[in-house]
Image: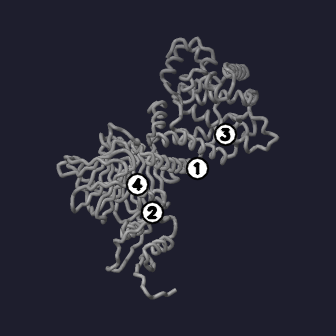
């Protein structure tokens, strides 16, 4: 304690920040108490000063959690829209060397993770049943939280160790976190027909598409920031060169130093696709010994396809990478994409099964844009117009039929 | 905990974490502050949202700061003044002074009490003598820990007048307040 405090008037004491911290919050309590004990005159002055400090506390309202999140959602949406606009401008001016990366990876036939020995293989705790069930989040403790909305928002707030899930707030268990140094993972499971936005503890933003799972720690404590993905996600990674961010999809590791990218890795798709919007990433095939060789460096506006059968990457230029992230904004946009690929996406978004005759030319290329906020019927009608087929919706199934060439029923 | 300067620079340079960090860190303070000027919840929330929209849009042109709280509150106050003025009927709009209505917890308690002790009455009268302007200065000084220069800047006061307001207010409180109940404080303190 500073000796010259003894000379202070009450007013000066009140103006002293460390004194107010003691008066209001009891900071450095024992130090102050020792100081008072040896200066009793000063103590009576200090008490009156404390009284004034306490008296000047204002009465105030707090903003409810629901409003806090509501405002955040609109700010976040605004930022995303703004970034997209800026990105488009930059692309037009051929200035695509921005600071962040956006990748899309779409993962194909993939049944289990065979990661390097060090990491062991990660197995999802949650069930991979995507067609039923609600979107849910599973904590390392095994506790489950259901995400009721069709588009949930989850934010890990490192400042006060809280998790915001839509409108509710979950306090992270601090003590169990410290003990659990083994990096226990949280898992988020998004069934077909839903999507979700996550804000990880390091500020990395993840959009998780329908029929996807993501495992990630509450806090990143290891050298590498590692997450595990099954399905499709778009990542906007916080830059931190000392702690590279790695998305593991089993067949491909995507290593980023601070970028924004989208990964689509669905079991049942034949390939893993990574599309980069900004920045740069390195793609690797992890082998059984954990040695990563032949890394492929992806540049903005490029797509890397990894065909599991061929076991190699094919890199192509993509003139309009924003197509690949249109799902974030609730759109499904496609340009010269095969009908089957579009139908598969519709299946996932609406949680339905689509059937078509064996002879149907599902590889025909189509282009267009669908608003996923519309009902299934409207979306299917738009598709049917473009691809020229008839369809029936029977409960959870859509049955596609060829149009009869010469029979005009209408 | 990262220093304000680093977080602010990270935000200006487009680091992803910074916006949400700043938002969740300061949202409650901004709301608490905004409600001093308007009871209209929606207005306060709208202006907070606008403030962040502005930050996003003008990110590349933002200046440096080592006090995010001050930066946000100063811009917030300007925006709020404009928004409130816009909603006022024309005949009042000449008066462009923004008046904060700061109520102290003690006063709030007195309102809900049926009978006040002599001591409470004295305190109540002492607080009543504080003008809205004085209260606002005291709020910045003691709740926000701003320095006098910042207070003058945010309230558009002349240099030194903030300091005068504070010392005048403290002096008045000190004189009017009855001797504190020393004994009570003491026992509370020794028992810890």
Whether callout 2 and callout 3 share a subunit is answered no
Q: Secondary structure at mark 3?
A: helix
Q: Nearer the viewer, mark 4 or mark 1?
A: 4
Whether callout 4 and callout 3 share a subunit is answered no
Q: Secondary structure at mark 2?
A: strand
Protein chain holding label 1: A
Q: Which picture quadrant has residue B109?
A: top right
Q: Which residue is mark 3?
A: B80
Q: Which residue is mark 4?
A: A321
Whether callout 2 and callout 4 share a subunit is answered yes
Instruction: Report, in whole angstroms, how far the alpha carbon at label 2 lies from the one at label 3.
Output: 40 Å
Which residue is outermost to the left? A289
Q: Which residue is mark 2?
A: A332
The residue under the point 60% across, 14% down is A8
Q: Which residue is mark 1?
A: A67
Whether callout 1 and callout 2 share a subunit is answered yes
Q: Nearer the viewer, mark 2 or mark 3?
A: 2
- Where A232 falls versus B120 (above or below)? below
Residue A229 drawn at (x, y percent):
33, 55
């Amino acid at each position: 304690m500073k000796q010259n405090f003894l000379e202070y008037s009450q007013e000066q004491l009140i103006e002293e920040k460390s004194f107010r911290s003691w008066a209001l919050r009891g900071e450095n309590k024992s130090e102050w108490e020792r100081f008072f004990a040896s200066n009793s005159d000063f103590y009576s002055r200090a008490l009156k000063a404390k009284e004034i400090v306490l008296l000047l506390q204002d009465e105030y309202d707090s903003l409810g959690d629901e409003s806090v999140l509501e405002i955040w959602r609109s700010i976040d949406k605004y930022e995303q829209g703004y970034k997209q606009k800026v990105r488009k401008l930059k692309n037009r001016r051929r200035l695509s060397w921005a600071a962040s990366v956006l990748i899309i990876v779409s993962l194909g036939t993939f049944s289990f993770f065979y990661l390097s020995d060090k990491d062991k293989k990660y197995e999802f705790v949650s069930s991979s049943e995507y067609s039923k069930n609600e979107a849910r989040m599973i904590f390392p403790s095994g506790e489950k939280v259901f995400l009721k909305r069709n588009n949930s928002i989850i934010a890990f707030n490192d400042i006060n160790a809280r998790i915001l899930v839509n409108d509710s707030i979950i306090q992270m268990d601090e003590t169990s976190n410290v003990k659990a140094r083994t990096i226990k993972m949280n898992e988020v499971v998004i069934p077909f027909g839903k999507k979700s936005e996550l804000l990880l503890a390091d500020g990395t933003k993840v959009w998780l598409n329908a029929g996807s799972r993501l495992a990630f720690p509450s806090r990143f404590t290891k050298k590498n920031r590692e997450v595990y993905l099954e399905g499709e996600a778009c990542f906007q990674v916080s830059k931190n060169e000392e702690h590279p961010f790695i998305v593991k999809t089993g067949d491909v590791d995507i290593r980023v130093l601070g970028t924004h990218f989208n990964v689509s890795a669905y079991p049942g798709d034949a390939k893993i696709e990574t599309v980069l919007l900004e920045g740069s990433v390195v793609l690797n095939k992890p082998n059984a010994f954990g040695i990563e060789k032949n890394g492929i460096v992806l540049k903005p506006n490029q797509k890397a396809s990894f065909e599991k059968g061929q076991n190699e990457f094919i890199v192509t230029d993509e003139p309009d990478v924003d197509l690949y992230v249109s799902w974030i904004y609730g759109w499904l946009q496609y340009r010269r994409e095969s009908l089957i690929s579009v139908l598969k996406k519709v299946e996932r978004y609406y949680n339905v099964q689509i059937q078509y005759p064996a002879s149907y030319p599902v590889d025909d290329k189509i282009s267009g844009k669908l608003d996923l906020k519309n009902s299934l019927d409207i979306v299917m009608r738009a598709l049917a117009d473009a691809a020229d087929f008839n369809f029936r919706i029977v409960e959870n199934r859509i049955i596609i039929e060829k149009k009869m060439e010469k029979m005009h029923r209408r | 905990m990262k220093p304000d300067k680093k977080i602010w620079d990270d935000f200006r340079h487009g680091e992803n974490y910074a916006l949400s960090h700043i938002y969740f860190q300061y949202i409650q303070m901004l709301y608490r502050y905004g409600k001093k000027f308007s009871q209209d919840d929606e207005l306060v929330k709208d202006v907070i949202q606008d403030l962040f929209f502005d930050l996003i849009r003008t990110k590349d042109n933002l200046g440096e700061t080592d006090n995010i709280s001050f930066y946000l509150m100063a811009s917030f106050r300007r925006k709020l003044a404009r928004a409130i003025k816009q909603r006022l009927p024309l005949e009042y709009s000449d008066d462009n002074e923004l008046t904060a209505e700061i109520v102290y917890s003690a006063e709030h308690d007195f309102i809900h009490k049926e009978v006040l002790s002599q001591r409470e009455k004295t305190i109540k009268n002492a607080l009543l003598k504080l003008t809205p302007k004085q209260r606002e200065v005291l709020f910045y000084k003691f709740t926000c820990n701003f320095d006098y220069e910042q207070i003058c800047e945010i309230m558009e006061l002349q240099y030194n007048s903030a300091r005068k307001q504070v010392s005048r207010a403290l002096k008045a409180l000190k004189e009017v307040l009855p001797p504190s109940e020393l004994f009570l404080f003491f026992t509370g303190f020794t028992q810890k």
